[in-house]
Image (cartoon, rainbow, N blue to C red):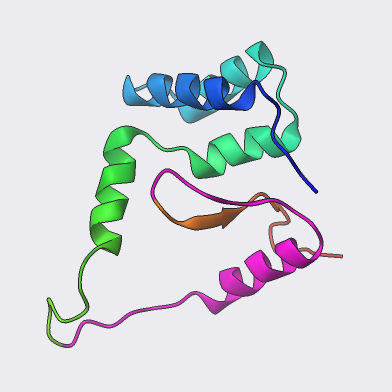
Amino acid sequence: MFAVSPRFPRAAREYRWLLDRGYSETASLKLVGDRHQLGRDERTILFRGVASSRASESRRKVLALPPDLVPGLAVLVDGYNQALTVMHYLVGRPLFVGTDGLLRDAGGSHGRIP
């Protein structure tokens, strides 16, 4: 079972702080990950699960739209990524809820699962 290190919550706050101030995701991830000695899974969780406050709020608003708000509104489901998330879970990769409220995985398989 995967568990984040005790350093992870502070690292997540620092990473988001940098994103909120316009710093690049890549540079921020490197800085915070190195500073807190985060492993690969924790860095993946930061990168995939922590967005700036503005981006997180924007995505949450989209998720909160009631289906009857717009007549004929279609809901699209990406079955391929749904299947990858389930497969990552089954092989023991971490799943988490991002700052935008979406369930994500730290699989990083890019479509390749053994």
Kindly give the residue lying farthest to the right in the view shown.
114
Q: Is residue 32 left or right of residue 21?
A: right
Residue 23 on image: x %, y %: 40, 20
Kindly give the residue lying farthest to the bottom in the view shown.
72
Residue 31 on image: x %, y %: 58, 15
* Residue in the picture at 39% in, 20% down: 17
* Residue in the picture at 70% in, 51% down: 94
Residue 27 on image: x %, y %: 53, 20
Residue 8 on image: x %, y %: 62, 26
Q: Which residues are magenta?
A: 72-100
The answer to if 90 sits in the magenta stretch is yes
Q: How many numbered discs?
A: 0
Instruction: Check the image and report above or below for 106 versus 37.
Output: below
Q: Is residue 101 left or right of residue 47?
A: left
The answer to if 41 sits in the magenta stretch is no
Q: Is residue 41 left or right of residue 67?
A: right
* Residue in the picture at 77% in, 63% down: 112
Instruction: Check the image and report above or below for 21 versus 76.
Output: above
Question: In which quarter of the view is residue 40 placed?
Answer: top right
* Residue in the picture at 12% in, 76% down: 69
Q: Is residue 10 left or right of residue 52?
A: right
Query: Looking at the figure, which quarter contains the C terminus?
Result: bottom right
